[in-house]
Image (cartoon, helix red, strand yellow):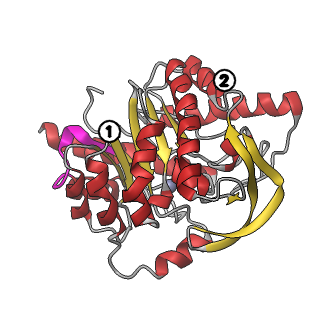
Amino acid sequence: MNKLLPTSTAGSLPKPSWLAEPEKLWSPWKLEGEELLEGKQDALRVALNDQRQAGIDIVSDGEQTRQHFVTTFIEHLEGVDFEKRETIRIRNRYDASVPSVVGAVSRNRPVFVEDAKFLRAQTTQPIKWALPGPMTMIDTLYDGHYKSREKLAWEFARILNEEARELEAAGIDIIQFDEPAFNVFFDEVNDWGVAALERAAEGLKCETAVHICYGYGIKANTDWKKTLGAEWRQYEAVFPRLRTSGIDMVSLECQHSHVPMDLIELLRGKKVMVGAIDVATDTVETPEEVAEVLRKALRFVDADKLYPCTNCGMAPLPRNVARGKLAALSAGADIVRRELSA
Ligand SMILES: [Zn+2]
């Protein structure tokens, strides 16, 4: 990007009410068959247009074609039984009934490649595509086959790499891996988590990003956040290893976050997607509030490596709120861009 401070979102945007019940995660589809396929594509076009109207520079599909950022990908793979469910603890935070790994995992057909081609055909702007990261994937499953988190992660990394290469060929400019699990399992992140992520990104010539957040604004996450104390220093445990990794960009949350901004310094040299929009509140930031976060971040990241972004996905927000936040992000980045060129 030649433009300074190119804006983007972490990924998801709210779905239209005719496609899925709004303001809900995992919301079931309201259409089926051909109608669902067409409905998803229409929603993708609307999400793209919302970003375009707000002046977002790096656009996405708004994750309109998936029900959940991890599960939808896994549903397309072999080796996972969605009928055979076990209750496990997700990210040490809440219990959930999850599908089981019952055999060798593999990807017999592309998952999002057709969707990515469709998005590519709609716009000449740079596009970003989100995939789940290997560690976050294993954390949503019961593994009755490999019986090793690390082994399963390497298998998923191999599968993700197959998908990522095809997404790149479809014209995706930035492939982002979502790894909220990196904020929880620090030892594993440093032992093999980042290495597995690099395996997922192996051989890619497009840019690669990792999104590490404190999750959507759902109750299990906000309750967990209350236990983290006044200063959230989780990033401190993983940024040094990420800095030496082959991943180009790191997406993190900063608006209303308890993360000390100076931790970004640990990533010096990487491109940083700075979350300047809080996704856990319906209150729309003012452009000045966005600008303030970006100015603070500029003390620790070079201007040509700062990418203003949202803290996380906006799927659970009302649509008008999400649109307002997109516009605020754009206007806030504009304020700082003008300051930098003055
Ligand atoms: Zn997130």
| Image quadrant in which the N terminus is located | top left
Label 1 sits on residue = 246
Residue appearing at x 44%, y 35% in the figure: 201
Residue nearer the viewer, 72 or 314 = 72
Relative to 249, is 281 above or below? below
Label 2 sits on residue = 114
Residue appearing at x 52%, y 65% in the figure: 280
Residue nearer the viewer, 73 or 87 = 87
What is the tally of numbered marks visible in this picture? 2
How far is mark 2 from mark 1, CA to CA?
A: 27 Å
Q: Position of residue 121 (x, y in %)?
A: 58, 17
Tell me: 20 left or right of 179: right
Tell me: 39 left or right of 277: right
Residue appearing at x 42%, y 35% in the figure: 55
Q: Secondary structure at mark 2?
A: helix
In magenta stretch: residue 304:
yes
Q: Please tell me which of labels 2 and 1 falls first in the chain.
A: 2
| Image quadrant in which the C terminus is located | top left
Specify whether residue 134 is in view.
yes
In magenta stretch: residue 70:
no
- Nearest to viewer (mark 2 / mark 1): 1
Specify whether residue 321 is in view.
no
User: Magenta residues, as a range?
Assistant: 298-307
**Contact? badges 2 and 1 (CB < 8 Å):** no
Q: Residues within 10 Å of mark 2 (few under 14, many from 20)?
A: few
Tell me: 42 left or right of 33: left
Q: Position of residue 277 (x, y in %)?
A: 42, 56
Specify the amino acid type for callout 1: Gly
